[in-house]
Image: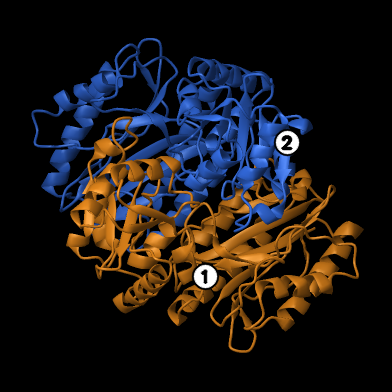
Chain colours: A orange, B blue
Amino acid sequence: MTVFKKAEYQRRIEHTKKLMSERGVDLLMVSHPANLNYLTGYDGWSFYVHQCVLVSLDREEPIWIGRGMDANGARITSFLSNDSIYQYADNYVQSLERHPMHFVADIIKQYGWAQKAIGVEMDQFYFTHRSYVELERSLSEATFKDANALVNWVRVVKSDAEIEMMKIAGTIAEKVMDAAVKHIRPGVRECDAASEIVRAQYAGTPAHGGDYPAIVPLMMAGEKSKTPHLTWTDAPFKKDEAVLLELCGVYNHYHTPIARTIFLGSEPPQLMKDTAKVVIEGLQATLDWIKPGVTAADVEAKWRAAIAHSTVVKESRLGYSIGVNYPPDWGEHTISLRSEDATILKPNMTLHLIPGIWYDEVGFELDASIVLTENGYEPLFTYPMDIVLNP
Amino acid sequence: MTVFKKAEYQRRIEHTKKLMSERGVDLLMVSHPANLNYLTGYDGWSFYVHQCVLVSLDREEPIWIGRGMDANGARITSFLSNDSIYQYADNYVQSLERHPMHFVADIIKQYGWAQKAIGVEMDQFYFTHRSYVELERSLSEATFKDANALVNWVRVVKSDAEIEMMKIAGTIAEKVMDAAVKHIRPGVRECDAASEIVRAQYAGTPAHGGDYPAIVPLMMAGEKSKTPHLTWTDAPFKKDEAVLLELCGVYNHYHTPIARTIFLGSEPPQLMKDTAKVVIEGLQATLDWIKPGVTAADVEAKWRAAIAHSTVVKESRLGYSIGVNYPPDWGEHTISLRSEDATILKPNMTLHLIPGIWYDEVGFELDASIVLTENGYEPLFTYPMDIVLNP
């Protein structure tokens, strides 16, 4: 019942073990749901309680540990054999007396790993400070290492099968933006437009059903268009206001983001038009140039040079790596397109370039989701690069 | 632009400060997005980067600290004055060199709080181990205390204005379940039914637009009905299979969950029918009896007694506290209806009773979301308590 063939998961695990060896990690405790899914196929909305996957250099298969009621979900959705699935009792959940990490520590002891070098994801949500404290207390002979984005860095170069998922997600992304453009009109309640957008996200295409996104539709209208990351109200859209959209298509948890700006009139403000022209030309120049072998910092420098003739200033990073993910973020927390990131780009890396610009009066957003090819890039979706006018 | 009047937030802050005093906490650092919203009104999908609200006994207004691009969102959605909003530069985001907690520590120093007793949410997602380590390193003279669910416990008794939100969420919940019952039919793709359910969640009612839920529609069909917490595929529903639904209505982030079981035929398996009868009668007996003054453990004992004549076994907790929330959980992480929870129930507490039963062959779920009144309870939604037959 896994999305990929078992061999794909095995390759991922081998790659993870290789990185573990290089970093002196004997046992890796993976907490982020995207990493659980990536290594085992596990796919349940159980990440609101503590759970993890253990990868040990001396055991072929990873071990899934979660809440008792979710063990059947692990049996159904992962490739793991039954003796690699461990379940803790329900009275560990949000208890003041016991913590799920006590149960995890017991399993670590049982396998003879209590004196090993244990890597944990120290700055990932889903691994709390208390988790660390309880593990450390229970495993006093272990050495703990920060393996924060170790699996995330394995994820950064996609397999061809993953690229296929993201291209399908791209076809869904196009339909999602179509739904937004169709329903975001003056007089329509923001929540009703949001409901049509999310409907398109979940329904997908006739050939490929959609999935839930790691980030709900972000839609900043009117006054809110001077900021990102807000959602909707039940107020109606007004004539001559701007609506910034950060959406995506999702297939089997693979994300292809899509962002555009709608203006609910026929004559956008001059500042928006000027900004759009600079951003679109700058983004296109960056895309025309991007290829394997350059660094993430080089990409940002290219973009900065391309808009240097204008007054547009982009203080935040230009983009980041994308792929399989779960709430609250579709970014992979690896590559950031900014001056200090020396990562060298490779074929089959997938990036979201999102030059959002927010002024005090208005904002503008437009993006590209791409996969790097041998010689350049291929877009993951096709959508006109312009302000959408919905008078 | 806040959802509640400023006085409501001020009461919440006063209550929080009272608990802080009792626990010897001078400065509270709040990380969970529901707690940020509860104390300030802040409402942005920015919780995938580090952010917090600081509550100090010696400062009237809390302080919001977040990423630069989200500061306008804080100005728009919270009641905070501009001098209570601090923004860190974008190169703190997912950086290997610097951490947002360095910025937070600088502000703590600037206000003269570096030697105070600082409470942090040690076992909340959204506060990582690394956050703790960086804070501790930067504030060597501070004393750190675990204030894990401090604000959550303030949230546990709702104001009348909050109860109003949850009743509206209840009217949306009814529409959401109606959409599920309408669209979950043999031959319909699971993803298409999910898309209609989520559409109903976001659209809400003509009077009140819906919001995004902290948990996406959980819908376990066929083989998956022996487990909770799974989502959908693009396979069609089959005749004579069961579909377990964990859904909710949401209004301004206030959640009223609703769970039912659909059977896609006219004759459910005997085991499901028997289980449904026991669960429904047991739940009703528990509801007829529940009132302020009893403990959470008493409620679970009453439920257990009510089903003791049967072979039904419910190993997991019977329910938990609900209210305002953000992904990944609509539970408040305070009251659990189970044998070890001695919390005394009070009027205006809101609970979700969800006796889910999963066998190896099939499962059954049905729930009640309620508010405690002076003498008993009031349901937050009205929906028939039975297996839904969709032949």
For residue A112, above or below residue B176: below
Q: Viewed as shown, does residue B92 lie left or right of B311?
A: right
For the question of whether residue B188 can be seen, the reply is yes
For the question of whether residue A231 can be seen, the reply is no
For residue A365, above or below residue B200: below
Q: Position of residue A305 (x, y in %)?
A: 83, 73
Q: Position of residue B38 (x, y in %)?
A: 57, 29
Going by the numbered disc 2, the residue's amino acid type is Ile
Q: Residues within 10 Å of mark 1 (few under 14, many from 20)?
A: many
| Residue at 63% across, 57% down | B97
For residue B190, above or below residue B166: below
Taking depth in this image into account, of A351 and A141 the one nearest to the observer is A141
Q: Position of residue A379 (x, y in %)?
A: 62, 78
- Is disc 2 placed on a helix, strand or loop? strand
Residue A354: quadrant of the picture: bottom right
| Residue at 75% across, 43% down | B72
Give the residue at mark 1: A169
Q: Viewed as shown, does residue A342 lie left or right of A187?
A: left
Taking depth in this image into account, of B164 and B31 the one nearest to the observer is B31
Marks 1/2: CA–CA distance: 37 Å
Disc 1 vs disc 2: Cβ atoms closer than 8 Å?
A: no
Taking depth in this image into account, of A364 and A289 the one nearest to the observer is A289
Q: Residues within 10 Å of mark 2 (few under 14, many from 20)?
A: some
Give the residue at mark 2: B85
* Tag 2 subunit: B
- Is disc 1 placed on a helix, strand or loop? helix
| Residue at 41% across, 40% down | A130
